[in-house]
Image (cartoon, rainbow, N blue to C red):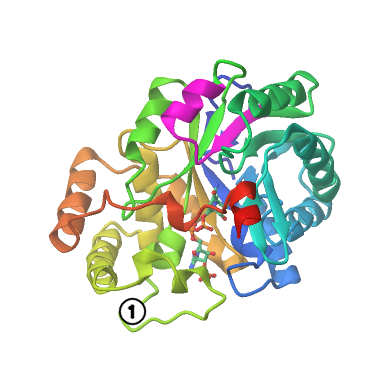
Amino acid sequence: MDMKKVKLGKSDVVATRIALGTWAIGGSGWGGTDEDQSIETIHAAIDKGVTMIDTAPAYGQGLSEELVGKAIASSNVKREDLVLATKAGIGFTDDGNYRDTRPERLEQELQESLDRLQTEYIDVYQIHWPDTDVSIEETAKKMKEFYDQGKIRAIGVSNFSPEQMNEWQKYAPIHTSQMHLNMLQRYLIDWFEYCKQNDIATLSWGSLAHGMLTGKYSKDASFSDDDLRSKIDLFQGDRFPSMIDAVGELKDLANKKDRNLIQLSIRWLLDHQPGTDVALWGARKPSQMDGVEGADDFELSNDDLQLIDEILYKHVDDLENGSLKEYGPPLRSQLQEN
Ligand code: NAP
């Protein structure tokens, strides 16, 4: 099936507007990995016409990348018909991850990612988290070197503020920027606006609010200690039941349109302003890719978008509040302090 596509900023990479996210496939923070099921999930996405797959070495200490590599090698799709996005700049130890974008580390990481993904080039190579222990100039120049050598087709950043992106662009282009956004968590909306104004393609992560926007949770949902949802604000405290009420009403709205809540949520990302160019849909079971086509073949009108906001703000008045702090790994210097 041909899905709608977008050119990524000033690069010549063209990707589907809905991409598969493979954080959960790495298992860490998501209660483990089922390898066969993970590979089937990637095949399901490809079979449905999704061309872009986002992964990272940090997802299961290389496991997610390895499974993406295996899935592509065992699929019928040609490498050049896929857009592989991975990341760099996170070190990992058994005690946890930390930011590390030193140029020598990036050099080593790129080779390791190419090996795990069984490929000769990366389409979109992203710095996973800004690392203030290293100058942006050094990191950006190293990424530009990879780009000039043809090892990567587009330069990406992730979780960078507009100020950090401004500094980066003194030394290297930015083709894509990956940031947190979904209709319940809008605290970075200004950063999306900045990218739109600067011709930087945006990729939204957490598009389904880590599963809340599937509508499958009730007010008494509980999560195991090794599931990140047991720690994330969105799933805690008094706001959680209000969110569940809002999500219930949105589900009804989606059903009235003969769609489901996931499709409505993905469309919100793609259709509202400033919107995102690509919505990453995280999945780890093949059945979770059901309905991708139904998210691609309709659009929300301005009236629909307004109705969604009326429903949401009736239940939750602080959709613009939130913080990247609960997601980002520490700096290397902070690890050394502890
Ligand atoms: P998400 O897309 O908000 O939610 C994904 C989760 O929703 C799935 O793992 C699954 O969870 C559930 N789900 C998905 N489809 C479903 C379906 N059809 N039916 C029922 N449940 C379904 O979450 P995300 O993985 O956090 O974000 C998406 C991607 O963004 C990631 O995979 C990763 O590639 C990227 N990301 C990047 C960063 C960054 O710092 N750059 C940070 C986070 C994520 P269960 O199976 O557990 O129910």
Residue 22 visible in the snapshot: no
Mark 1 Cα shell of 10 Å, populated few (<14), some (14-19), many (≥20) = some
User: Which residue is rendered at x = 42% and y = 82% of the image?
Assistant: 222
Count of numbered circles on the image:
1
| Magenta-highlighted residues | 154-168
Could you say which is closer to the camera, residue 236 or residue 192? 236
Q: Inspect the magenta stretch and tell me whether residue 157 lies in it.
A: yes
User: Which residue is rendered at x = 75% and y = 56% of the image?
Assistant: 62
Answer above or below: position of 158 versus 98: above
Answer above or below: position of 195 versus 45: above
Residue occupying the far front of the picture: 337
> Would residue 185 be found to the left or right of residue 195 on screen?
left
Q: Amino acid at mark 1?
A: Ser
Percent coordinates x, y for residue 51 in the rendering:
64, 42
> Would residue 52 be found to the left or right of residue 233 on screen?
right
Percent coordinates x, y for residue 109 in the rendering:
78, 42
Answer above or below: position of 300 versus 58: above
Percent coordinates x, y for residue 55 in the rendering:
66, 50
User: Which residue is rendered at x = 35% and y = 54% of the image?
Assistant: 264
Residue 271 visible in the snapshot: yes
> Would residue 325 be found to the left or right of residue 172 on screen?
left
Residue under pointer 1: 218
Q: Quadrant of the N terminus?
A: top right
User: Which residue is rendered at x = 68% and y = 38% of the image?
Assistant: 101
Q: Quadrant of the C terminus?
A: bottom right
Q: Inspect the magenta stretch and tell me whether residue 113 lies in it.
A: no
> Would residue 301 be found to the left or right of residue 267 on screen?
left
Percent coordinates x, y for residue 36 in the rendering:
75, 70
Residue occupying the far top of the picture: 170
Could you say which is closer to the camera, residue 298 or residue 29? 29
